[in-house]
Image: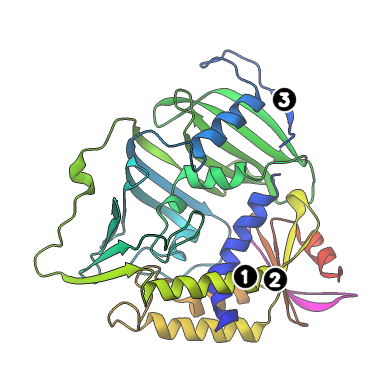
Amino acid sequence: MRRGTFVRWGVPIAAAAVIGAAIGAGPVIAAVRGEPVLPERSAEQLLADAVAATGKDGGLPPMSGTVQQTASLGLPALPQTGSASPLSLLSGSHEVKVWYGAADKLRVAMPTQLNETNLILNGGQAWYWDSATNTATKLTVKPGTRPAGTSTPVPQPADLTPQQVAARVLANTGEHTAVRVINTAQVAGRPVYQLVLAPKDDGSLVQEIRIALDGETYVPLQVQVYARGSAEPAYQVGFTQVTFTPPAEENFAFTPPAGAKVEERTLGADGIGQRAEERAEHAKDVAGDLKVVGDGWTSVAVVPFSLADLTAAANGQSGQNGQSGPAGDGGDRFGGEGDPRALLDSVLKSATPVSGTWGSGKLIKTKLVTALLTDDGRLLVGAVTPEEIVKAAGVR
């Protein structure tokens, strides 16, 4: 179900990409004066430092800590699930524990109210532990099956950290952004520089994005996204506790608990590898269909889509998620999504009918993202005001 796959993976990614790509190098610099806690550095210097700290080859220093992610996007009440999932991260507050030893030594633990999932990477081997299903899956990476930049079907640990979010933002800075520096802030008890990026265009729903860089290592410790007119961040991910010392080796060792179901998978073989290839192939199809209207912070992504596609995809995914067999045939254990049908029903109830010379459709607005599903089969998504997205609907 190609359109269904887009609902599952493409729409959240597209929304994030619109916000990230909107930020757009060549910023306008406005330094904040006052009593500095840290030595003054220009925005250009800090941008270079941040890119180096988040770049693929820059290399993070060994570290460990607790990351808290909070979202208050103004979405309707979301269905509650018993385990961590992409849907659950759209609202409320969530905690993740991270241990980073090197590029091939990483552990991420996401506890929920009753359960916990762990992803442990150690060299060419990985374990994924799901306490809810009492299942430990041993993953082996085949040489040459995971080229740089290719996503895998296992949970992406970096997606839950300030470093990954900051990397996406900083990779797409540009002329539509004003940047200022604050050097008097603290995160997790450490002095930080804050890069404050704000759109020049009033058509964006984003007021500003604050990236806090550790004053010693320049590692991003927190990212905050403020909606226009709001004093509190609509989205925030950051360390509440962090230590820049090498984690003990025992953190990267894993032995399945007694009585646990143990499975083995090889990335690149049938099953997980096949699903990864299918998603990669579909990503190319989506990219071919994708159209971008506007630029900077007011960019709007447009893809062919319809309400029927959404409903069919949600119904199909709800059925899959309801299965509980071995990984591969039932729900996707490495990316469970709760109940997409329940989310769809909640979101559509909040939709507002709109029309124009381009036709009619249903408009959904959150604090940071506006979406328009047109009756002629298009989905428009952007970090823009309803007026901007309706205007974009008229561009053919």
Cα separation between marks 1 and 3: 40 Å
Amino acid found under the numbered disc labelled 3: Ala
**Residue 363 part of the magenta-drawn span:** yes
Q: Which stretch did the figure color magenta?
A: 352-367
Q: Residue at x 78, y 63 (%)?
A: 389
Q: Which mark is residue 284?
A: 1
Above or below 370: residue 94: above
Image quarter for residue 114? bottom left
**Residue 303 part of the magenta-drawn span:** no
Disc 1 to disc 3: CB gap under 8 Å: no
Above or below 197: residue 392: below
Amino acid found under the numbered disc labelled 1: Lys
Q: Which residue is mark 2?
A: 288
Disc 1 to disc 2: CB gap under 8 Å: yes
Quadrant into which the N terminus falls: bottom right
Cα separation between marks 3 and 2: 39 Å
Q: Mark 3: which secondary structure?
A: strand
Disc 3 to disc 2: CB gap under 8 Å: no
